Image: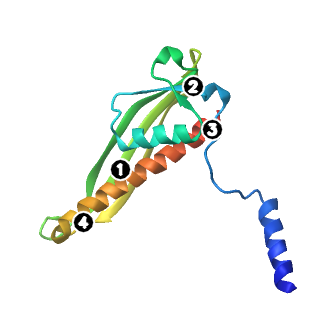
Amino acid sequence: MVLRTFVLFLAAALAGCGFHLQGAARLSPTMSITFVEAEDTHTQFHHAFMSALDTAGVRVATERSQATAVVAIKTDDSGQRVLSVSAQNTPTEYEVFYTVTFAVTAGGKELLAPQTVTLTRDYSFDERALLAKEHEEEALRAALANDIVGIVMRRLASL
């Protein structure tokens, strides 16, 4: 009986606090038909962003004239920097970064001024495990791109 009461209390507390599972972002009707303007359409961010728009129920226009809103991806850049080196002057730690700058317009009005989102992660480097570290870097880069897509979608949902 105590366990049943505790479970009911916990369920009521979770429902009352506003907790809900994360799902697809609900975008405004202005974003229902969106044109994505990007120089490079083969980046990890671009692929993940297009998938997120599709999940949110947005129809992506193939021509700018068909769209009710335009998301302009001005910068989509990633890379790595050396963070530390050993006594033999070989890198021991790298930082992977991903930067995206975007803006949103609709009907000739700027809905969202250009905003830049930059995320970084670092990882240790061992030249004896070169292939594994290359895979780790690629996985970090993909995770950063997905995290930035989440940030961008939340900002679009706030419009």
Badge 3: residue crowd in 10 Å (few <14, some 14–19, many ≥20): some
Q: Closer to the camera, 149 or 34?
A: 34
Q: CA distance from mark 1 to mark 2?
A: 31 Å
Badge 2: residue crowd in 10 Å (few <14, some 14–19, many ≥20): many
Mark 3: secondary structure: helix
Q: Closer to the camera, 107 or 122?
A: 107
Q: Closer to the camera, 127 or 113?
A: 127
Please state the horizontal and vertical placement of residue 28, each as a whole percent of the image. Answer: 66, 31
Q: CA distance from mark 1 to mark 4?
A: 19 Å
Q: Closer to the camera, 100 or 40?
A: 40
How many discs mark residues in the rendered view?
A: 4
Q: CA distance from mark 4 to mark 2?
A: 41 Å
Q: Which residue is mark 3?
A: 157
**Is residue 92 shown to the viewer in this render?**
no
Mark 2: secondary structure: strand
Mark seen at residue 132: 4
Left or right: where does residue 54 sit relative to residue 76? Answer: right
Q: Which residue is mark 1?
A: 97
Residue at x 41%, y 51% (from the top left corner): 144
32 up-or-down from 44: above or below: above
Quadrant of the frame with the C terminus: top right
Q: Which residue is mark 2?
A: 33
Looking at the picture, which amino acid does disc 2 mark? Ile
